Image (spheres, grey):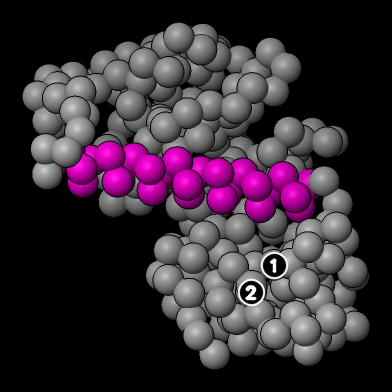
Amino acid sequence: MTLHSRHSEQDAAAILVSSPSVLSKIAGYVHTDDSAENVDWARVAELADRNILSSVDRAFLGICADIAGWAEDPDASGRSFGSRWDALDWQHQAIIAGVLTASAQAKRTDERRLLGREAFIDTYHETDREELNVVRVRLGADHPAVVNDALGRERVGYRPGASANELWQRGRGVWRMQPDRVISSQLLLIAHAGEIRLVGTIDGVTIHGDRLAIIGSPLADHPLIGQPDPLDNGSQNPVAYGSLPAEE
């Protein structure tokens, strides 16, 4: 079996941890940290082809395994990516689309930075920037998401022990934000109880009525994680905007 790239396994793992209901059914095969090596993709692919879970769950797991490079030959199994996609409900389709869109945006940003270092393109003098514009969102405690959540989530808020990918999905949307402030910002800070729990890039936004969701990539090793919320102003508004020194 030909394995896909490391990026594809990371994307597949991010999709898995974004669906707690499915994850709970295959907890023995998946450890919800940031390492794709901790996913037993062979077992996940096997479970996707057995009549144990619902058709939606099986299709979801099959697509995750396919993205990770562990899907069976569709001609042999009779289960193509397209047929599995059609079997999904809109929530699971939204999860997959959201993670893959964020991944594509992050890869585009990485490519631009690489080309900028090689002087092939102008990256707006990022290395000379003295300040970074940031958006901070403040999460409450873990609780069920609203019915028909725009990002297909079943739970939102801060959950102790959540992986960076899960916390990113919980925190990146959907918020009432000022579009111009968000678009001009480089980092999203996700806070809870006065502490920064995760930092991620802001590479774009999606619009959901009068609310926005951030497209970007979590930065699990950012030095601001674990530090006091630098934009904690006592306001009841969970969204705040500000600037931080670029060395942050």
Decide which of 142, 200 is in the foreground and name it: 200
Say whether residue 198 is left or right of residue 91.
left
Determine the residue positioned at 37% across, 36% down.
201
User: Residue at left 20%, top 33%?
Assistant: 121
Number of marks: 2
- For mark 2, what is the residue? 65
Question: Which structural element holds mark 1?
Answer: helix
Q: Amino acid at mark 2?
A: Ala
The residue singled out by tag 1 in the image is 63
Residue at 56%, 64% in the rendered image: 12
Tell me the quarter of the picture where residue 22 sits.
bottom right
Q: The magenta stretch spans which residues? A: 91-117
Magenta region includes residue 230: no
Q: Is residue 177 visible?
A: yes
In the image shown, does 225 or 72 lie closer to the viewer? 72
Indicate the position of residue 129 as horizontal and vertical percent values: 14, 22
Q: Is residue 116 magenta?
A: yes
- Give the crowd class for mark 2: few <14, some 14-19, many >=20 residues within 10 Å: many
Check whether the beta carbons of the residues at disc 1 and disc 2 lie within 8 A of each other.
yes
Q: Main secondary structure of the magenta part?
A: helix
As helix, strand or loop, the secondary structure at mark 2 comes to: helix
Residue 246 drawn at (x, y percent): 16, 27
| Rendered location of residue 161, percent (x, y) | 51, 57
Q: Is residue 26 left or right of residue 37?
A: right
- Residue 240 position in % (x across, y down): 44, 15
